[in-house]
Amino acid sequence: MIRYMFSPRAALFSLFALMLPLGALSAPVSAEVPEYVIVIKNHQFEPAELKIPAGTKVKLIVRNEDPTPEEFESYDFNREKIVRGNSQIKVFVGPLKPGTYKFFGEFNPQTAQGRLIVE
């Protein structure tokens, strides 16, 4: 007759040994996300037209140099975020298919107009 003795230490070690390869496989791959800056100044976007690569996630830094808030908005790539005066936000976009995607400032829609050109 074979008897097995339960050892909490052995059980913990076995569990750790089993989880180690799974953790190594699920580790995130470090990749830089391309970053682009859009400035709001005098209620206009600079640049008003920005080219970004197709099929790639990008980070937009939207810097508001006006003292008043603005809302960075796009129906085309489904984003809506307030940018307080004299501050900045990060907006992740994509990956997008090639084409033109409009964005605008909701608080100043007549002057705050822009486009992402995805190539």
Image: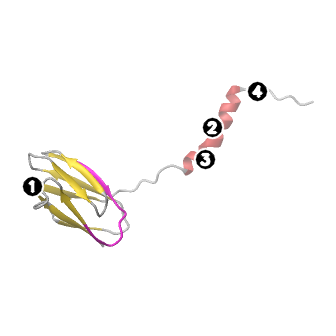
At x 12% / y 56%, what residue is drawn? 108
Estimate the spatial distance between the alpha carbons at disc 1 and disc 2, rounded to whole Å: 55 Å
Q: Quadrant of residue 97?
A: bottom left
- Disc count in the image? 4
At x 33% / y 73%, what residue is drawn? 98
Q: Which residue is mark 3?
A: 21
Residue 31: x, y in percent? Answer: 39, 56
Estimate the spatial distance between the alpha carbons at disc 1 and disc 4, rounded to whole Å: 69 Å
Q: Which residue is mark 4?
A: 6
Please tell me which residue lies in front, 6 or 103: 103
Estimate the spatial distance between the alpha carbons at disc 3 and disc 2, rounded to whole Å: 9 Å
Q: Is residue 37 left or right of residue 53?
A: left
Mark with earlier residue (1, 2): 2
- How crowded is the residue under tag 4: few (<14 C-alpha within 10 Å), some, or many (20+)? few
Q: Which residue is mark 1?
A: 41
Q: Which residue is mark 2?
A: 16
At x 47% / y 51%, what residue is drawn? 28
Q: Quadrant of the N terminus?
A: top right
Residue type, mark 1 in image: Lys
Mark with earlier residue (2, 4): 4
Residue 90 painted magenta: yes
Q: Secondary structure at mark 4?
A: loop
Residue extending farthest to the left is 42
Q: Which residues are the magenta region?
A: 89-101
Residue 14: x, y in percent? Answer: 68, 36
Mark with earlier residue (3, 4): 4
Residue type, mark 4 in image: Phe
